[in-house]
Amino acid sequence: MEFKMVDAKILLKSALRPIVFRPAPDLPAGAGVSLRSLQLEDLNRLFDLIEQNRYHLQRWLSWIQSIQTMADCKNFLFSVNYKSVYSGKWVFGIWYGAELVGLLDMNEPNSNKKEISIGYWIAEAFQGKGIVSRAVTCCMDYLFTEKKVEKIIIKCATENHRSKAIAQRLGFEWESVTHDAGQVNGRWVDLDKFVMEKQVWFNKRNLK
């Protein structure tokens, strides 16, 4: 009986505690753009951002449908894991000044090959301002220099020209296309795969 009481207290404490993983520093990307680890205090901002851009996002992101309520959004925040970039649940908020305007995530990790895929989205009102390009550049510098990642991959729907343009603008090499890679809102989409090797990026950025 005593064990159950202790266990209940632990569960309650776990349910109430805020997200406290902060191994990822705030990363300034220049021109008012920065990357920050998501925290519970960002819950309202994130939910409002998704709601305001739901129609815009659901064309390309199937997971948007899984966040319908504030509780869904909170569960998403608690699923974020900053213990390792290879956790598959490492997510940065993209901030423009004091405003949360999008997300950048690391997924499909392969720690043996030291490679990782990144994905990103931004509010429709903030497209075309170079914010995502700055955020991705900053993230890549961090992954290659601080986390010793060897290869970064971007996969975009073939028809998502804005997303593909970012990869191309940053010098990613197109590698392949996967036809009927997955369904988004009932339609099959093809995915283009772009890759960037660490040394190629270092040469472009004059990094060592």
Image (cartoon, rainbow, N blue to C red):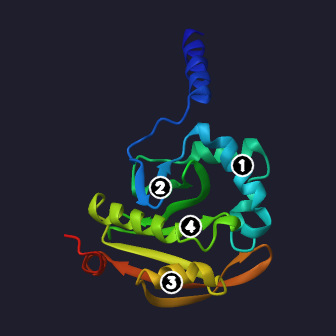
Q: Measuring 34% from the left and 60% from the top, which residue is drawn there?
A: 142
Which of the two discs, 2 and 3, labels the residue nearer the N terminus? 2
Residue neighbourhood size for the residue with mark 3, other residues' Cα within 10 Å, grouped as few (<14), some (14–19), many (≥20): many
The residue type indicated by label 4 comes to Tyr
In terms of sequence position, does the residue under pointer 1 or pointer 2 come before the other? 2
Report the residue at 32% width, 67% height from top.
Answer: 114
Specify which label sits upstream in the sequence, 1 or 4.
Answer: 1
Q: Which residue is mark 3?
A: 193
Disc 1 to disc 2, C-alpha distance: 19 Å
Distance, label 3 to label 1, CA atoms, is: 29 Å
Closer to the camera in the image, 76 or 57: 57
Quadrant in which residue 183 is drawn: bottom right
**How far is disc 3 from disc 4 in space, using C-alphas?**
14 Å
Q: Amino acid at mark 3?
A: Lys
Quadrant housing the N terminus = top right
Residue at the disc numbered 4: 120
| Residue 47 disc label | 1
Element at label 1: helix
Q: CA distance from mark 2 to mark 3?
A: 26 Å
Identified at 52% across, 79% down, the residue is 166
The answer to which of 191 and 162 lies nearer the viewer is: 162
Crowd tier of the residue under label 1, counting other residues whose Cα lies within 10 Å: few below 14, some 14–19, many 20 or above: some
Sequence-first disc among 3 and 4: 4
Q: Are marks 3 and 4 in contact (CB under 8 Å)?
A: no
In the image, what residue occupies the spot 70% across and 67% down?
A: 124
